[in-house]
Amino acid sequence: MRTGNGNDMHELSMAEAVNNTIKDLCARSGWLRARRVVLKVGRMRQVDHELLAFAFEIVARGTPSEGAELSVLELPTVFRCHSCGRETTTEGMAFVCMNCGSTNVELLSGMELTIESMEVDQQGA
Ligand SMILES: [Zn+2]
């Protein structure tokens, strides 16, 4: 269930960004096409995996990633406290140190959106 802040195209713009990255990688490396793509996505991105896979299928049409299988590795939200130095992993969106209660924290993980790995068809290989 989404919070409904009029952000319904969130996954679509992410899928476009990912697809553009794959297109560039393929063009630069001379790869024919992507077969399988594994994405690393931080929890704070609040990505709906099914929606993302669906959006990716649409934007991939006519590009080297057409028909590629997309999977998503979700990374937890982790922050470090500046007051006591402890790291906290959270499921939610509250940035309060579990150890000392400070809100003087720095985000370490949770906003990722990167390609973890890809299987590709290499030209002339
Ligand atoms: Zn602390």
Image (cartoon, rainbow, N blue to C red):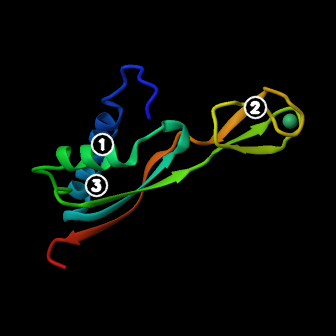
Q: Distance between the Cα atoms at labels 1 and 2?
A: 30 Å
> Alpha carbon of mark 3 to alpha carbon of mark 1: how far?
15 Å
Kindly identify the residue that appears in the image at 76 percent across and 44 percent down: 88
Q: Is 11 displayed left or right of 85 in the figure?
A: left
Q: Amino acid at mark 1?
A: Ala
The crowd level at tag 1 (other Cα within 10 Å; few <14, some 14-19, many 20+) is many
| Tag 1 residue | 15
Whole-percent x, y for residue 86 in the image: 83, 44
Residue occupied by mark 2: 105
Q: Is residue 6 above or below residue 81?
A: above
For the view shown, which residue lies furthest in the top direction?
6
Comes first in the chain, label 1 or label 2:
1
- Left or right placement of residue 86 versus residue 60 in this view: right
Q: Residue visible at 51% across and 44% down? A: 112
Residue 25's disc is 3
- Tag count in the figure? 3
| Marks 3, 2: nearer the viewer | 2
Give whichever of discs 3 and 2 has the lower sequence position. Answer: 3
Comparing marks 3 and 1, which lies closer to the viewer?
A: 1
The quadrant holding residue 104 is top right
Viewer-nearest residue: 92 or 33: 92
Vertical relation: 41 (above or below) 9: below
Identify the amino acid type marked 2. Answer: Val
Q: Is mark 2 within 8 Å of ligand 1?
A: yes
Q: Residue furthest bottom?
A: 125
Query: Which amino acid does the dot numbered 3 rest on?
Result: Leu
Label 2: how many Cα within 10 Å (few below 14, some 14–19, many 20+): many
Gap between marks 3 and 2, in whole Å?
Answer: 35 Å
Place of residue 15 in the rendered image (x, y in percent of width and height, measured from the top left): 30, 42
Of the numbered discs 3 and 1, the one sitting upstream in the chain is 1
